[in-house]
Amino acid sequence: MKRALLPIFVFALLVVILFIGVQRAPEKTVIPSALIGKSAPAFTLPILGSDQAFSESSMRGRWYLLNVWGTWCPECLNEHEILLEIARSERVPIIGLNWKDDAVAAQSWLSQLGDPYDIVAVDRDGEVAIEWGVYGAPETFLIDAMGKVIYKHVGPMTREIWQREFVARLPPAGSNT
């Protein structure tokens, strides 16, 4: 009987150790991106609610955030308020990449909850997100004035993450270069 309990005890101990390790891991939301330090992938996509198109090249000369989101994403709802705060601060423009979503649902979402985005590009088939190395929504990229990807955050934006990871990497307020 004692012999049969040993494997169960060892398995339970491993589960507890893994659980504690995952909970305490400081870099849970850091997924290395091959894009860091490289030019942002080029794209041209339709603008949500418009017959015009948006190209990332139109942002050259300006730092900006690219926030990947969808109305089907519960964590996107969790980060929405902080995105509104960031937009109100006018520190950096936010470009939304509406990923594999329904345009009517996306427009309704922004009408009801507020629109933090300067522009929302619509990636219906997800091909642009693949080029950016997106694993899931939400993900937020910081792109510099030269069009280089400076940082990538996977998961919902929080005030702490905004300050620690994004503001710390931005040029001083007013310079935008």
Image (cartoon, rainbow, N blue to C red):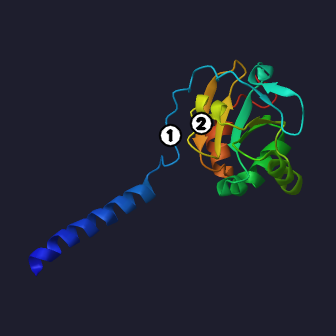
Tell me the residue at 49%/49% (across/down).
28
Q: Which amino acid is tagged 2? A: Lys
Residue 107: x and y, percent?
85, 48
Position of 20 relative to 52 (above/below):
below
Task: Tell me the quarter of the image containing the N terminus.
Answer: bottom left
The image's mark for residue 31 is 1
Instruction: State the CA–CA distance, disc 1 to disc 2.
Output: 8 Å
Quarter residue 10 falls in? bottom left
Q: Are marks 1 and 2 in contact (CB under 8 Å)?
A: yes
Crowdedness near tag 2: few (<14), some (14–19) or many (≥20) residues, C-alpha within 10 Å: many
Quarter holding residue 153: top right
Q: Secondary structure at mark 1?
A: loop
Q: Is residue 18 left or right of residue 35?
A: left
Would residue 96 be found to the left or right of residue 131 on screen?
Answer: right
> With respect to residue 74, does 103 lie above or below?
above
Residue 136 in percent (x, y) is at 59, 45
- The residue depicted at 41 percent of the width and 56 percent of the height is 22
- Tag 2's secondary structure? strand
Mark 1 nearby-residue class (10 Å; few <14, some 14–19, many ≥20): few
Say which amino acid is labelled 1: Ile
- Position of residue 139 measured from the top left corner of the image (x, y, whole percent): 63, 42
Front in this rendered view, residue 131 or 114: 131
**Residue wearing tag 2:** 152
Pick out the residue farthest to the bottom.
1
| Quadrant position of residue 150 | top right
Report if residue 114 is visible in the image. Answer: no
| Residue 116 position (above or below residue 63) | below
